[in-house]
Amino acid sequence: MKCSVYIATSADGYIATAEGSVDWLDTAGNPDADMSDNPDMGFNDFIASVDCMIMGRKCMEVIASFALTPEQWPYGDTKIYVLSHSLAVPPENLLGKVEMYAGDIPKLINRLKSNGFKHAYIDGGATITSFINLQLINEMTISKAPVILGDGIPLFGKVDQNIKLVNSEVTVFPNDFIQIRYGVSYL
């Protein structure tokens, strides 16, 4: 099963402030830029390429805090699993949209494969690091926002080994965001 990351960070590599806020994403970059050619910076194309999603509890809680309407829900009908050992039930506004999972990640991947899933979207810093340490991530798309936070929650936690990133592709957007797509090679 292919496992891909699609995430935004600050220029200094943080996915959220120390308090967990991602509000800075709304104000980063050039607000007057003409983004009509690619207003979502490739997200809709990416989400159309996946058939399931695995995220961490904290990531789910951030999404729940947005109180998205059905029209704003960015994941369509994608099957979403949330990794958590502390929550058995999702927040009320995500009931029916996500399924909680507290087991072993390789067992979840095997279950998804046996159910015919082929491409998983992996989201959330700790979850991404866990998948990297299990050598399950195949590619990463990281959009760098033109802002320096100086502190916060880093994209990557402690990795068990050096990870080689290969076949990089870079896209520079008119709003000053830079998106880098990497293949992942485990040394």
Image (tube, rainbow, N blue to C red):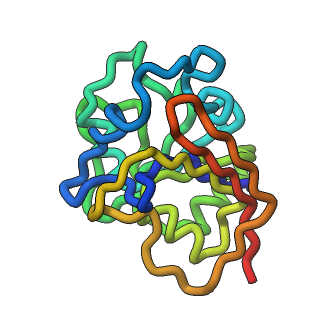
Residue 63 on image: x %, y % = 33, 38
Image quadrant where one finds the N terminus:
bottom right
Q: How many marks?
A: 0
User: Most extreme residue toward the left, as rendered?
Assistant: 19
> Would you say 38 lies left or right of 81 here?
right
User: Most extreme residue toward the right, as rendered?
Assistant: 167
Residue shown at 37%/37% (left/top)?
A: 28
Q: In the figure, 76 relative to 9: above or below?
A: above
> Would you say 21 lies left or right of 126 here?
left
Question: Which corner quadrant of the image does residue 139 belong to?
Answer: bottom right
Q: In the figure, 11 relative to 104: above or below?
A: above
Residue 121 on image: x %, y % = 59, 47
Image quadrant where one finds the C terminus:
bottom right
Residue 115 on image: x %, y % = 70, 46
- Residue in front for this viewpoint, 142 or 92: 142
Residue shown at 54%/17% (left/top)?
A: 34
Residue shown at 55%/37% (left/top)?
A: 79
> Would you say 178 lies left or right of 146 here?
right
Residue 88 on image: x %, y % = 29, 53
- Residue in front for this viewpoint, 93 or 13: 13
Q: In the figure, 39 relative to 46: above or below?
A: above
Residue shown at 43%/44% (left/top)?
A: 99
Q: In the figure, 158 relative to 36: above or below?
A: below
- Residue in front for this viewpoint, 88 or 37: 37
